[in-house]
Image (cartoon, rainbow, N blue to C red):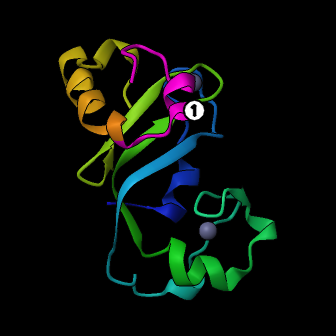
Amino acid sequence: MVRYYHLELLACPECRNPRLVVYPVRVTEGGMPPRPESLKCRRWCYLFDRPSSTVPVESCVSSCVYKDIEEGVIVCPSCGRWYPIVDGIPVMMDDKYRDEERDREAAARLSPHLPDWIRIRARRPVPL
Ligand SMILES: [Zn+2]
Ligand SMILES: [Zn+2]
């Protein structure tokens, strides 16, 4: 399951850009990890969409470390690729391993829940 504080560990598999745009479609609150106080966003807080140095520690500790993103989309603003989050797992594959049929299914399922700006940004390889 991907939680908000995990997102900063991801990078675009094609262009290696680590500053992604994440749009959650379904979020659940999982159980607290064993030591939430030692876990927080370190570089970029995706929940508040700000550098983590500007987010109070308590905010990440009380939210980012236990919110699971079950479904959503990750967009790379530098190359325009998008990646689905399916059943809590970010499916981030190189183009050569992507399954176009599965991408089409994910796009059909997710895009009605996404704002226009994210569809405009996310273009390749299958439009959202
Ligand atoms: Zn955070
Ligand atoms: Zn990229």
Residue 9 seen in the figure = yes
Q: Residue at x 18, y 17 (%)?
A: 101
| 70 or 35: nearer the viewer | 70
List x then y, in percent, for residue 74.
Answer: 47, 39
Placement of 106 over or under 79, stated as above or below: below
Q: For residue 115: magenta? A: yes
* Residue on which the image places disc 1: 117
Q: Pointer 1: residues within 10 angstroms few (<14), some, or many (20+)? A: few
- Which corner quadrant holds the N terminus? bottom left
Asked which quadrant contains residue 43, the reply is bottom right
As drawn, the residue found furthest toward the right would be: 54
List x then y, in percent, for residue 30.
Answer: 32, 76
Tell me the quadrant of ligand 1.
Answer: bottom right
Extent of the magenta region: 113-128
Ligand 2 within 8 Å of the CB at mark 1: no
Residue 91 seen in the figure = no
Specify whether 125 is left or right of 122.
left
List x then y, in percent, for residue 59.
Answer: 64, 80
Q: Residue at x 48, y 17 (%)?
A: 123
List x then y, in percent, for residue 52.
Answer: 73, 65
Placement of 64 over or under 18, stated as above or below: below
Q: For residue 22: magenta? A: no
Q: Residue at x 27, y 24 (%)?
A: 103
